[in-house]
Image: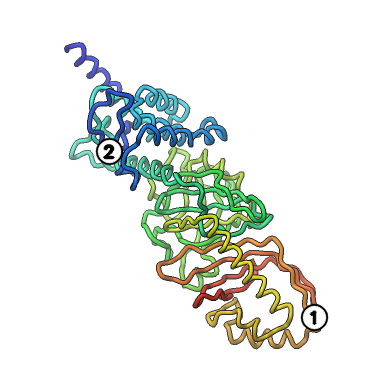
Amino acid sequence: MIRTIVCALLLLVLIAATVVRVVALWPQPAYIDSPEQVIPINDFAPGVHLLSPSTGTELLERLEPRFERLADDYEAMLLRGLLLFQAGKIDEAISQLKSLTRVAPRFELAHLVYGDLLLARIAPLETIGSAAPTGPGDTNRQQRLEELRSEARARLQGYLSLLNTDRVPDSLITLGENTPYALVIDKSKNRLYVFSNQGPGAAPRLVDDFYIVLGQKVGDKMVEGDLRTPTGTYFVTSYLAPELLPSLYGNGAFPINYPNEYDRRKQKTGFGIWLHGTDRSLFSRPPLDSEGCVVLTNEEFDRIRQYIVIGRTPVIISEELEWIAKNDWQDLKSTINMVIKQWRQHWEGGDLKPYLDMYSKDFWTSQHDYDSWGTYKQQVFAGKTYQQIKISDLSLYGYPRDGDAAPLIVANFVQHYRSNNFNGDMRKRLYLIKEQDQWKVVYEGRQ
């Protein structure tokens, strides 16, 4: 009995000496004394109430491709340790977290979880941070523990949200031939997903995903300084190397085109929304901690660079992603392709009325509204003996829905125009809005 008490005290001293101690991610009703014991995780994954042995095995197996891509995938190592712990395999879990703290010594959450797993050998865990108790007056320490708890939950929820990978986001309809990847963000999960272009006729395939940090305030960005991350369909505009930036931005930044055409139409303000790394003094940050930017760890920022083509790669930011079956995706793709084809044919044929019928009464460009656009096009058509319009490199993106707002599609493509008195190629962007079951052009302009 005395020997047990002494060992326990020594273990607690060891835990207290570690830099930052972490926590078990969920309430644990009893000391783990059986490898077959399962632990409730409903607080961390809505709809998933128990981690059964079969489910635990499946979740662990789904991590393996991440290790095949990158042996030192720090988040995957953390998740593996947590899943092993949930499955009651505490020795394997501790071994995994011990390895992680060695290869990623600044990963505070890993240290905290490691400390909790050590404590779990001698006592039940009640919450994240059991290995690092705080007193009533220790406000800063309590706040940091809450930040680490929220990061732990966000990482686990993000991983568990991918249980069904046979669906695609409704925002990814078509990726053009010069758009190899698309970045899709689910703000509700603090998750960034990378989808690969699988060629004509095939749905984009999920190839990578990341935990991300978002703005301190939830909801869509509306005004400058509101500390919110915008919701919308955006595109990477440039790359800023780390030597050009303060250390706050870590290993670099990719600015996006916020505010876009639709944002400006809605009179949104603000600027400087970037995907960027983490301050070099830190490993990671809490889920809601930026001024509106999307933040990754520096290691993952370096990894995501391979997926980005300046001027082409979309960054689609949703409050909560809508995932649809591939049959529904195919139907949506066919419908929008037909709308684009009809628009092009009416324009090419000089059929003014059916051509203008393809436009919303709310249509705008940088210089025209619907009425002035009709007058302008009537004058242009009058001087044409023929028009030939071809479209290439077509990408179609669903715009994230804003409450009860009408569905919106963004179309990017190269327009090849030939006529009796003008020839030219340009990169064009259309916004299509659904009005009374009909898709109409609501915006047209250069990319």
Image quarter of the C terminus: bottom right
**Which of 314/91 is in front?**
91
Q: Residue at x 44, y 38 (%)?
A: 283
Q: Amino acid at mark 1?
A: Tyr
In percent of width and height, residue 226 lies at: 39, 61
Residue 3 in the figure: left or right of residue 64: left
Q: Residue 415 occupies which quadrant of the picture?
A: bottom right
Residue identifier under label 2: 141
**Camera-nearest residue between 438 and 11:** 438
Mark 1, residue position: 386
Residue 391: x %, y % from top left: 71, 66
Q: Which residue is found at the position 39% from the left and 44% from the top? A: 157
How many numbered dots are placed on residues in this image?
2
Above/below status of 431 relative to 100? below
Judged from the image, the secondary structure of the residue bearing numbered disc 1 is: loop
Residue 341 figure quarter: bottom right
Secondary structure, mark 2, is helix
Quadrant for the N terminus in the image: top left
Circles 2 and 1, Cβ within 8 Å, touching? The answer is no
Whether residue 360 sits left or right of residue 142 in the image: it is: right
